[in-house]
Image: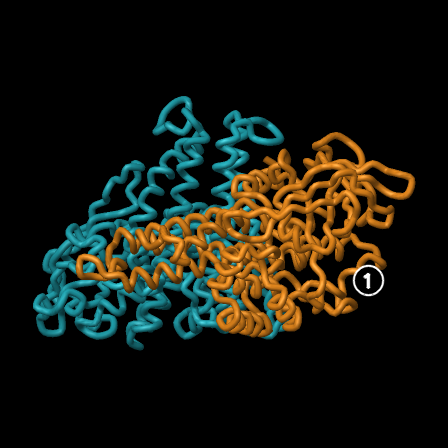
Amino acid sequence: MQLVLTEDQELLAKTAADFVAERSPVSRMRQLRDQEDPDGFSRALWKEMAELGWVGIPFSEAFGGAEMGLAELAVVLEELGRALAPEPFLATVLLGGQALALAGSDAQKKAWLEAVVSGDRFLALAQQERGSRFDLHRVATRAEATGSGFRITGEKVAVLDGAAADAIVVVARTAGAEDDRAGITLFLVPADAPGLRVERQFRVDARGAALVHLEGCEVGGDAVLGKVGEGLAVLEAVADRATVGLCAEMLGSMSEAFDRTLAYLKDRIQFDVPIGSFQALKHRAAELFIQIELCRSAVMAAARGVDEGDGEAAKLVSLAKARCSEAAIRVANEAIQMHGGIGMTDEHEIGFFLKRARAAELTLGDASWHRNRWARLAGY
Amino acid sequence: MSDPTDLEAFRREARQWIEANAPPEIRGLESSIEGAGNWGGRRATFDPPEMKVWMERMAERGWTAPTWPTEYGGGGLSKDHAKVLGQELARAKAPPALMGFGLEMIGPTLLQFGTEEQKDLHLPKIARGEIRWCQGYSEPDAGSDLASLQMKAVRDGDDFIVNGTKVWTSYGDLSDWIFCLVRTDPEAKKQEGITFLLIDMDAPGVSVKPIQLISGKSPFCETRFDDVRVPVANVVSEIDAGWTVAKALLGYEREMIADAFGGSRSGSKKKTTGQGSRLVQLARHYGFGNGGALSDGVLRDEIARLEMDERAFHLTVQRSRDAAKAGHRPGPESSLFKVYATELNKDRHELMVRIAGAQGLGWEGPGYEDEEIALTRAWLRSRGNSIEGGTSEIQLNIIAKRVLGLPD
């Protein structure tokens, strides 16, 4: 594993940074929030990102993708994270998209992936429930076999960009008790399936999320993704990939929050001097710098670990998410404190970074969940 | 970048040579920055005696200082070749044939700043382990504010007359030569009147007294200089230009300390997991359950947190080296190595003593295993990690100023 960007990756990062600077300032996110946009992101901009090839990065060339890895996707997501861009890479490319790519039949992939890669279709993954916390195997939603297919009943929460999705990958239990590892099945449910009701949620980070009600939702046998009862392994692989993507976004947004704070420390004059000359603030800034650098190493290693099928990839993913979760919150809290009163106003953008950090922390496992997973994977 | 086929040929050669020349008695011996292992010098004691054989054979080959030029007793190897040699030594469980401040600190400094005469005189003796060096930087009234040092060197013909006291001279009582910062111009601005001077500790007027630490050990000394005569030819770089040399050497020192505390040169993950499992083994040994999840969930989380912090640190060291290999200039991440490595080492010792519980309190005598007493004393010793070589607070100042550009 080489923890250094290749020339191609550096070029990609530069393209992404230029695009974000020109087309996606943080103010765009504010606008979407204030308009209560039903999607919570821009479909037009998504189409442009697809044309740049970003949406297709991890998908097969057969569907118009680039067949590149998380290492490449991460450099793009880091730049988007800097600007808090809300476009649905997590939901469409990494959660729903990877479930399809990893477990879908040829017919399912053919039906969906080309339109996903071209930026015309959106996907989501409905996994989390009110009682499941972050555990992937705790599934109460049930799917009963009917003559022609399955009837799914349950409720899913925090479904990222669920309201915009054309199809939702639903995690349901076809056998076993609520926390059995076996008996979990993935279903690809079209948004217009009977008995499926999607309700947009409004969260602190203003990103698109939804409640998904499965009220005896009827699907055909061809809706099953992968094998009946064996969905957990797929789900774990999907979650690890999505977590790497989320960490890359977090790395970008914490870096941006830190850079803005650093600039403020140099500009803001109190007691006739820049407040950045005070050692009480200097040391805290230096400590934040250290935390961000450690996050960068962990995110790069996790992306490459998953791409290369490293035996320790799952541990590296948990390392990255645990670190990014704590660092993003710490950086954002310090950013507000160091900005002082102005940092508490909605008019100033620095508060958005705290809201995004909290939402990201509490998505796909927080720091203590991932430390717990690390210890379990290490055998203690 | 070296030719890989050439590297593989070298690997085979090194492997054969090590197999033929590393005495079985020295295989698997420990060495550490805390003084274990062979540090050479006139007062060297070799335990076991085969260590002397090992040192001489390695020195003959130039491999005690693998990357130094051959004319100064080095091996003339590229960094890539030296890395392969390190891997083969580790593979054969052969400890370093020679360690110390000569190889790690004054040697590289002389290669950078020394005169031809100085290099000819000192480097081969360092590489052969004949002369052991110590460092004379801090003084009783000059710690973090190093540039306020007062040890005086007054010109007298071709000599300086040196008077003053240095503290925290590591292993001063076992060393033969000392590299010192001395004040040659008391009128100049603090950093400008300082000279970097090499002093033979056998010279009349040099006296050394060990300092006992809270750990009960005495790795450091106080070294006094009373009218010591030192030739002007022993100045490294120019008179009054010692601060520049000192800063370069501090860089080598921080690298050595960061390396010693986990920035393992190979960047291997094996070491990390090994260390992690040592904490877990310790926890199981001291009653936190024989299998499965540790019985105390809070302690388990603390172990996981430390292991993960250590892994993130190792990955950062690896990232820095991978970037260097790819031809990038050193990135800002290298500035965190010293402060973070030493804080982690303190955390690790803290946690180990707490895991040991009442068995972590032993000083000497009955009821404690040797390893337990060593653990307790190592915990106390580790408190100094974030003080020596530039305190953590000084490191944070440096990051704030040089990396983040925050104003004074």
- Camera-side residue: A316 or A244? A244
The residue drawn where x is 41% and y is 41% is B347
Q: Is B346 rendered above or below residue A258?
A: above
The residue drawn where x is 84% and y is 59% is A106
**Residue holding disc 1:** A110
Q: Is B402 rendered above or below residue A232?
A: below
Amino acid on which the number 1 mark rests in the picture: Lys
Is disc 1 surrounded by few (<14), some (14 to 19) or many (20+) residues within 10 Å?
few
Residue B69 drawn at (x, y percent): 43, 73
Q: Is B63 rendered above or below residue B239?
A: above
Question: On the rendered structure, is A150 left or right of B214?
Answer: right
The quadrant holding residue B219 is top left
Question: On the rendered structure, is B350 left or right of A368?
Answer: left
The residue drawn where x is 77% and y is 60% is A112
Chain coloured orange in this rendering: A
Total residue callouts: 1
Q: What chain letter is assigned to the residue under label 1?
A: A
Q: Quadrant of the N terminus of chain B?
A: bottom right
Residue B53: tell me if it is visible.
Answer: no
Residue A56 drawn at (x, y percent): 69, 66
Chain B, hue in figure: cyan
- Camera-side residue: B347 or A373? A373
- Camera-side residue: B375 or A36? A36
- Camera-side residue: A14 or A170? A170
Residue B18 drawn at (x, y percent): 56, 59
